Image: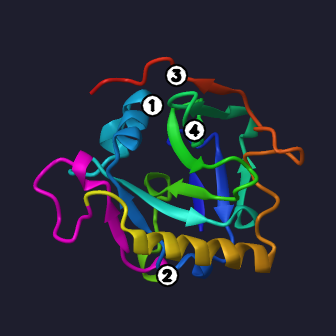
Amino acid sequence: MQFKCRCGNVSGVIQQETELQGLRFICMCKDCQAYAHFLGNPESILDANGGTEVVPVFPKLLQITKGFEHVRGVKLSEKTGLFRWYAGCCRSPIANSLPSQAGYIGLVAARLGDLNRETLGPIRLRVNGESGIPPLPEGTHKGTPSSWFFVILGQILRMYLKRWKRPNPFFDASNKPIAPVEVLVSPPKF
């Protein structure tokens, strides 16, 4: 499965996409919405409820094949541990990640183009509905249900057992980000 930014300068591939089946979710948190507004194109990232479709990806299965020089990073505050990666050339979102040691990458599905929904399966969960735009779809959770943490723990264990934590496309071998990371003093208001 391939992904690319809007202008095509940054592109990459997800290997073994069947390993990602059943992990897609929608996040409606204020940070995901602020990130879309920071990039300046929320209408191409957020759904009608203010949600971002995310596909968790194991680091080793995600490769940026073109345009490393255009990749930029941002953190919405100094306190947050979440890095948000985008293509600086056209301000397209690429992914969210925790620091390299954690091994989590959430690819923003808006950049997947012809997303193979049959392979990846349906949206598994809609979270952080307290920040969503009503009317919310049935089954939307106000926050993140505790049962989802067990799913994540299972995925982390699987990542370690299959040795899919490295390489991480957003961090070098010494766990430093591959691009400068801007920390926003005040995230955009919307």
Mark sitting on residue 71 = none
Q: Earlier in the sequence, mark 2 or mark 4?
A: 4
Please report contact status of discs 3 and 1: CB closer than 8 Å, yes or no. no
Q: Position of residue 4 (x, y in %)?
A: 57, 50
Q: Which residue is mark 4?
A: 86
Quadrant location of the N terminus? bottom right
**Label 2, label 3: how many angstroms apart (C-alpha)?**
36 Å
Q: Earlier in the sequence, mark 2 or mark 1?
A: 1
**Label 4, label 3: how many angstroms apart (C-alpha)?**
14 Å
Please report contact status of discs 2 and 4: CB closer than 8 Å, yes or no. no
Q: Mark 3 belongs to which amino acid?
A: Leu
Mark sitting on residue 119 = 2
Reply above or below: 28 against 117: above
Most common SS among magenta residues: loop
Count residues near mark 1 (Cα–Cα under 10 Å), then give few for <14, some for 14-19, many for 20+. Answer: some
Please report contact status of discs 2 and 3: CB closer than 8 Å, yes or no. no
Identify the residue at horizontal 45%, vertical 31% (top origin).
39
Residue furthest right in the image: 173
Q: Which residue is mark 1?
A: 39
Q: Mark 4 belongs to which amino acid?
A: Tyr
Please report contact status of discs 1 and 4: CB closer than 8 Å, yes or no. yes
Q: Position of residue 121 (x, y in %)?
A: 42, 80
Per the image, label 1 sits on a secondary structure element best described as: helix
The one nearer the camera, 179 or 153, is 153
Count residues near mark 4 (Cα–Cα under 10 Å), then give few for <14, some for 14-19, many for 20+. Answer: many
Q: Is residue 138 magenta?
A: yes
Per the image, label 3 sits on a secondary structure element best described as: loop
Q: Range of the magenta residues?
A: 120-141
Q: Earlier in the sequence, mark 1 or mark 4?
A: 1
Mark sitting on residue 184 = 3
Q: Earlier in the sequence, mark 2 or mark 3?
A: 2
Count residues near mark 2 (Cα–Cα under 10 Å), then give few for <14, some for 14-19, many for 20+. Answer: few
